[in-house]
Image (cartoon, helix red, strand yellow):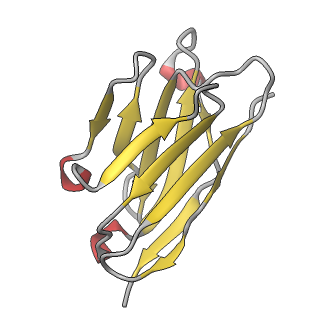
Amino acid sequence: QVQLVESGGGLVQPGGSLRLSCAASGTSFTIDIGRWYRQLPGQQRELVATVVNSGTTNYKDSVKDRFTISRDKDKKSLYLQMNALKPDDTATYYCYARTRFQMDNDGYWGPGTQVTVSA
Protein backbone atom coordinates (compact mmCIF):
# COMPACT_ATOMS: atom_id res chain seq x y z
CA GLN A 1 0.00 0.00 0.00
CA VAL A 2 1.36 3.42 -0.98
CA GLN A 3 1.04 6.39 1.32
CA LEU A 4 1.99 10.00 0.70
CA VAL A 5 2.81 12.28 3.59
CA GLU A 6 3.28 16.03 3.18
CA SER A 7 5.33 18.28 5.43
CA GLY A 8 6.70 21.79 5.44
CA GLY A 9 3.56 23.87 5.70
CA GLY A 10 3.11 26.65 8.20
CA LEU A 11 2.69 30.37 8.75
CA VAL A 12 4.88 32.76 6.79
CA GLN A 13 4.91 36.49 6.15
CA PRO A 14 4.22 37.89 2.68
CA GLY A 15 7.38 37.70 0.61
CA GLY A 16 8.66 34.72 2.55
CA SER A 17 9.44 31.18 1.43
CA LEU A 18 8.38 27.66 2.30
CA ARG A 19 9.39 24.28 0.97
CA LEU A 20 6.76 21.55 0.93
CA SER A 21 7.81 17.91 0.87
CA CYS A 22 5.83 14.81 -0.02
CA ALA A 23 7.33 11.44 0.88
CA ALA A 24 6.05 8.25 -0.75
CA SER A 25 6.11 4.87 0.98
CA GLY A 26 6.03 1.59 -0.89
CA THR A 27 9.17 -0.19 -2.04
CA SER A 28 8.34 -0.40 -5.73
CA PHE A 29 6.47 2.89 -6.07
CA THR A 30 8.07 5.79 -7.89
CA ILE A 31 6.74 9.29 -8.44
CA ASP A 32 6.74 9.35 -12.24
CA ILE A 33 3.98 11.95 -12.36
CA GLY A 34 3.78 14.33 -9.41
CA ARG A 35 1.45 17.23 -8.83
CA TRP A 36 0.75 19.81 -6.16
CA TYR A 37 -2.80 21.06 -5.71
CA ARG A 38 -4.25 23.59 -3.31
CA GLN A 39 -7.71 24.17 -1.94
CA LEU A 40 -9.55 26.77 0.09
CA PRO A 41 -12.59 25.85 2.19
CA GLY A 42 -15.70 25.67 0.01
CA GLN A 43 -13.71 25.91 -3.20
CA GLN A 44 -12.57 23.40 -5.77
CA ARG A 45 -9.08 21.97 -5.60
CA GLU A 46 -6.83 23.69 -8.15
CA LEU A 47 -3.71 22.41 -9.83
CA VAL A 48 -0.61 24.38 -8.94
CA ALA A 49 2.31 22.48 -10.46
CA THR A 50 3.10 19.26 -12.33
CA VAL A 51 6.21 17.25 -13.08
CA VAL A 52 6.02 14.35 -15.53
CA ASN A 53 8.22 11.33 -16.13
CA SER A 54 10.56 13.17 -18.49
CA GLY A 55 11.11 15.90 -15.92
CA THR A 56 9.08 18.50 -17.77
CA THR A 57 7.29 20.86 -15.41
CA ASN A 58 4.17 22.98 -15.71
CA TYR A 59 2.74 25.69 -13.46
CA LYS A 60 -0.42 27.62 -12.79
CA ASP A 61 0.10 31.11 -14.24
CA SER A 62 -0.13 32.88 -10.89
CA VAL A 63 2.77 30.90 -9.41
CA LYS A 64 5.14 30.83 -12.38
CA ASP A 65 8.59 32.23 -11.53
CA ARG A 66 7.80 31.90 -7.80
CA PHE A 67 7.20 28.15 -7.28
CA THR A 68 9.38 25.24 -8.34
CA ILE A 69 8.31 21.59 -8.37
CA SER A 70 10.96 18.89 -8.20
CA ARG A 71 11.63 15.26 -7.26
CA ASP A 72 14.57 13.53 -5.63
CA LYS A 73 16.76 11.34 -7.83
CA ASP A 74 15.08 8.15 -6.62
CA LYS A 75 11.60 9.55 -7.35
CA LYS A 76 10.47 8.79 -3.82
CA SER A 77 9.89 12.38 -2.74
CA LEU A 78 8.19 15.37 -4.33
CA TYR A 79 8.92 18.97 -3.43
CA LEU A 80 7.40 22.41 -3.95
CA GLN A 81 9.69 25.36 -3.32
CA MET A 82 7.53 28.44 -2.82
CA ASN A 83 9.15 31.88 -2.90
CA ALA A 84 7.77 35.42 -2.78
CA LEU A 85 4.64 34.10 -1.12
CA LYS A 86 1.47 36.16 -1.23
CA PRO A 87 -1.66 36.09 0.95
CA ASP A 88 -3.50 34.62 -2.07
CA ASP A 89 -1.27 31.54 -1.77
CA THR A 90 -2.93 30.67 1.55
CA ALA A 91 -4.56 27.24 1.21
CA THR A 92 -4.27 23.59 2.10
CA TYR A 93 -1.73 22.03 -0.25
CA TYR A 94 -2.03 18.42 -1.40
CA CYS A 95 0.45 16.26 -3.23
CA TYR A 96 -0.63 13.70 -5.79
CA ALA A 97 1.54 11.00 -7.33
CA ARG A 98 1.33 7.99 -9.60
CA THR A 99 3.59 5.78 -11.63
CA ARG A 100 3.68 6.06 -15.42
CA PHE A 101 1.78 2.73 -15.60
CA GLN A 102 -1.21 4.01 -13.67
CA MET A 103 -4.20 6.01 -14.80
CA ASP A 104 -4.91 9.34 -13.12
CA ASN A 105 -7.81 7.87 -11.11
CA ASP A 106 -5.45 5.27 -9.64
CA GLY A 107 -3.01 7.79 -8.23
CA TYR A 108 -2.44 8.59 -4.58
CA TRP A 109 -3.09 11.69 -2.49
CA GLY A 110 -1.51 13.03 0.64
CA PRO A 111 -3.63 14.28 3.55
CA GLY A 112 -2.68 17.92 2.96
CA THR A 113 -0.60 20.56 4.70
CA GLN A 114 -1.75 24.07 5.58
CA VAL A 115 0.08 27.10 4.23
CA THR A 116 -0.88 30.48 5.65
CA VAL A 117 0.63 33.69 4.30
CA SER A 118 -0.11 36.58 6.61
CA ALA A 119 1.57 39.53 8.28
Q: Quadrant of residue 86?
A: bottom left
Residue 26 lies left or right of residue 116; in this view the side is: right
What is the quadrant of the N terminus in the image? top right
Residue 98 position (above or below residue 45): above
Residue 65 lies left or right of residue 77; in this view the side is: left
Residue 78 lies left or right of residue 65; in this view the side is: right
- Name the one closer to the observer, 31 or 90: 31
Residue 79, how many percent across, how many down? 52, 45
Residue 48 position (above or below residue 20): above
What is the quadrant of the C terminus in the image? bottom left
Q: Point out the residue furthest to the left here.
A: 61
Rendered residue at 41%/23% (across/down): 52
Rendered residue at 55%/39% (across/down): 78
Rendered residue at 41%/65% (across/down): 40
Residue 107, how many percent across, how many down? 58, 27
Q: Point out the residue furthest to the top here.
A: 101
- Name the one closer to the observer, 107 or 50: 50
- Name the one closer to the observer, 30 or 88: 30
Residue 87 position (above or below residue 63): below
Residue 92 position (above or below residue 101): below
Residue 105, how many percent across, how many down? 53, 24
Q: Point out the residue furthest to the bottom here.
A: 119
Q: Quadrant of residue 13?
A: bottom left
Residue 32, how many percent across, how many down? 53, 21
Rendered residue at 41%/30% (across/down): 51
